[in-house]
Image (spheres, grey):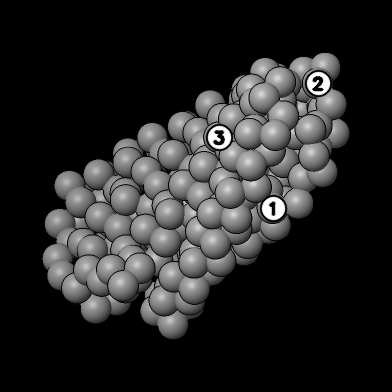
């Protein structure tokens, strides 16, 4: 009974750390988009600097999970809970890197006026932030219905990204002098789209945790 209590307490620490990672990523993406819209290079630099905290959280999860495996020797679903925590922490760390990449675009565009109002990028970011929240909640609650919802949200992000590609390539054809910034905005769209993909990965890992089978939510 004591070993089970210790395991449950250790697992709860893992869950809390993942919750904090998810919140950190969501805030980083939100601030990165704000920095892009407002040309706030100080905010962009802060986002890049704070990415180190996310890396440390991932290391903490690896350390805590490894300790639980060594000391408690979990099996079946208990072991899956730890393995999935490892995978989710990796996805979240990469999502944080991508949010930092958005902030780096702000720095590269310092002093430039936007060639067009940002419409698709903020819309994509709002959907992806919801995906991040849903992904973490699906894991914490072991909610497979919420995990499967991720695919529908990801489709919306992909559709906005495709629309953005078409519009910006057309813009580059008509205004070659603005091609450099257009390419940077396309990169931002790609970074946000990739964050959505990682959120979908978390949904897939949640389904694996609950069922023992790994689905493809994009099918």
Q: Where is residue 180 in the image (x, y as percent from the top left)?
A: 64, 22
| Quadrant of the frame with the N terminus | bottom left
Identify the disc placed on residue 112. Answer: 2
Q: What element carries label 2?
A: loop
Does residue 208 lie above or below 98 as drawn? below
Q: Position of residue 47 (x, y in %)?
A: 66, 30
Depth check, front residue: 41 or 89? 41
Identify the disc placed on residue 90. Answer: none
* Sequence-first disc among 3 and 2: 2
Q: What element carries label 1?
A: helix
**Left or right of 131 in this view: 112:** right
**Which residue is painted at 38% across and 35% down in the image?**
59
* Residue identified by numbered label 1: 120
Q: Circles 3 and 2: CB distance less than 8 Å?
A: no
Does residue 123 lie above or below 208 as drawn? above
**Left or right of 161 in this view: 126:** right
Q: Position of residue 173 (x, y in %)?
A: 63, 34
Q: Circles 1 and 2: CB distance less than 8 Å?
A: no
* Sequence-first disc among 1 and 2: 2
Q: What element carries label 3?
A: helix
Q: In which quarter of the image is residue 169?
A: top right
Give the number of callouts.
3
Does residue 119 lie above or below 179 as drawn? below
| Quadrant of the frame with the C terminus | bottom left
Give the alpha-carbon distance from disc 1 to disc 2, as whole Å: 19 Å
Label 1: few (<14), some (14–19) or many (≥20) C-alpha neighbours in 10 Å: some
**Which residue is painted at 42% across and 61% down in the image?**
200
* Residue identified by numbered label 3: 187
Give the alpha-carbon distance from disc 3 to disc 2, as whole Å: 16 Å
């Amino acid at each position: 009974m004591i070993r089970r209590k210790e395991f449950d307490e250790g697992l709860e620490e893992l869950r809390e750390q993942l919750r904090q990672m998810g919140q950190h990523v969501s805030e980083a993406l939100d601030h990165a988009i704000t920095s892009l819209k407002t040309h706030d290079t100080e905010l962009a630099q802060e986002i890049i600097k704070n990415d180190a905290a996310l890396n440390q959280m991932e290391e903490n999860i690896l350390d805590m999970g490894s300790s639980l495996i060594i000391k408690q020797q979990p099996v079946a679903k208990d072991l899956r809970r730890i393995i999935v925590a490892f995978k989710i922490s990796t996805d979240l760390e990469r999502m944080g890197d991508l949010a930092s990449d958005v902030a780096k675009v702000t720095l590269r565009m310092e002093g430039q006026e936007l060639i067009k109002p940002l419409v698709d990028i903020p819309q994509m970011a709002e959907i992806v932030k919801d995906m991040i929240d849903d992904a973490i909640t699906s894991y914490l609650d072991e909610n497979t219905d919420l995990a499967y919802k991720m695919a529908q949200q990801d489709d919306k992000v992909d559709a906005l990204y495709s629309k953005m590609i078409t519009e910006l390539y057309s813009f580059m054809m008509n205004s070659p002098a603005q091609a450099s910034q257009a390419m940077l905005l396309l990169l931002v769209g790609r970074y946000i789209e990739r964050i959505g993909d990682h959120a979908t990965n978390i949904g897939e890992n949640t389904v694996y945790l609950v069922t023992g089978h790994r689905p493809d939510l994009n099918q």
